[in-house]
Image (tube, helix red, strand yellow):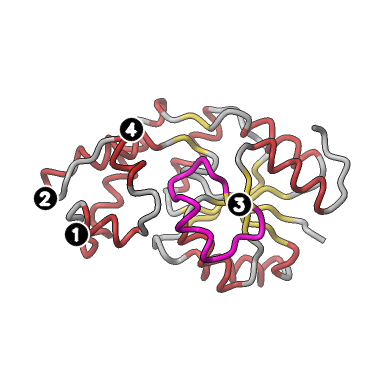
Amino acid sequence: MMKYIIFDFDGTLADSHAVFMKAWNNYADTFKYDRVKSEDIIATRNLNLHQRAKLFHFPMHKLPIILPKIYGYFKAHIQEVKVFDGIKEMLDILSQHGFKIIILSSNAKENIELLLAQEKIDAVSQVLTSSKLFGKDAVLKKFLKKQQLTPEEVLYVGDEIRDIIACNVVGIPFMWVSWGLDGFELIEKEKPKYVVHTPQDIINTLASTISLDLIR
């Protein structure tokens, strides 16, 4: 039976699109890649990370240098970040019904905890971070082993192709949220188990799937 729900952070819980775009553009001249506008992000939803990097001339080999600067910008502008509408209520309901709520992100743990405090969210029991953009499968394996869980006892909720690929490596069921970064055309080839369009859909899907009397 499902016990833990692991959420991605940026694009799934946190509406951090605008701040990350500002951070990206802030370092564009320094690292000689293209600036972007909101319409550029929307237009490339069905491209993977490497395809986007090529399109905007982003130097992926400099990612270990650039990413900490991006997250530092995020921290300095944390007050501009909010969670999506309905997220806090959804997390509270799931927690009240016995699910352990975990966050797994490549963002800095301090940033995540700052936003949770800012949004007065206390339903999250643990924050896990991956130091690498593509290292979530290793974190998930370690988490399963430490908690002595089978993959079926966990659900991962996220918005990006790299999240579902990590889950497929480990065997954890994946729920894709449509309000995040990546588009469904990119995601569907990896066969997410669930597709949801609102935080309320997460509650409804879990209620119907595992016959829980969740508040609607």
Q: Is residue 187 magenta?
A: yes
Amino acid identity at mark 1: Pro
Report, in whole angstroms, how far the alpha carbon at label 3 lies from the one at label 2: 34 Å
The residue carrying mark 4 is 76
The residue under the point 15% across, 50% down is 33
Instruction: Please report whichever mark, 4 or 2, sits nearer to the chain's N-terminal start.
Output: 2
Kindly report which numbered mark, 4 or 2, lies closer to the viewer in this rendering: 2
Residue 56 vertical placement versus 15 (above, below): below
Magenta range is: 177-194
Image location (x, y in percent) of residue 194: 66, 54
SS type, badge 1: loop
* Residue holding disc 3: 157
Judge depth for marks 3 and 4 and give the one in front: 3
Mark 3 lies on a secondary structure that is strand
Discs 3, 1 touching: Cβ within 8 Å? no
**Distance Cα–Cα, label 4 vs label 2:** 23 Å
Query: What's the CA distance linking mark 1 and mark 4?
Result: 24 Å
Q: Position of residue 166 (x, y in %)?
A: 52, 67
Q: Secondary structure at mark 4?
A: helix
Q: How far from the left and from the top, in percent, is residue 27?
A: 18, 43
Residue 32: image tag: 2
Residue at the spot of label 1 = 59
Q: Residue at x 39, y 60 (%)?
A: 133
What's under tag 2, amino acid-wise?
Lys
Question: Given the image, on which type of amino acid does mark 4 rest?
Answer: Ala
* Among the two numbered marks 1 and 2 on one chain, the one whose residue lies closer to the N terminus: 2
Please name the amino acid that badge 3 sits on. Answer: Val
Contact between labelled residues 4 and 1, with CB atoms less than 8 Å apart: no
Find out whether the residues at labels 3 and 2 contact each other: C-beta distance under 8 Å: no
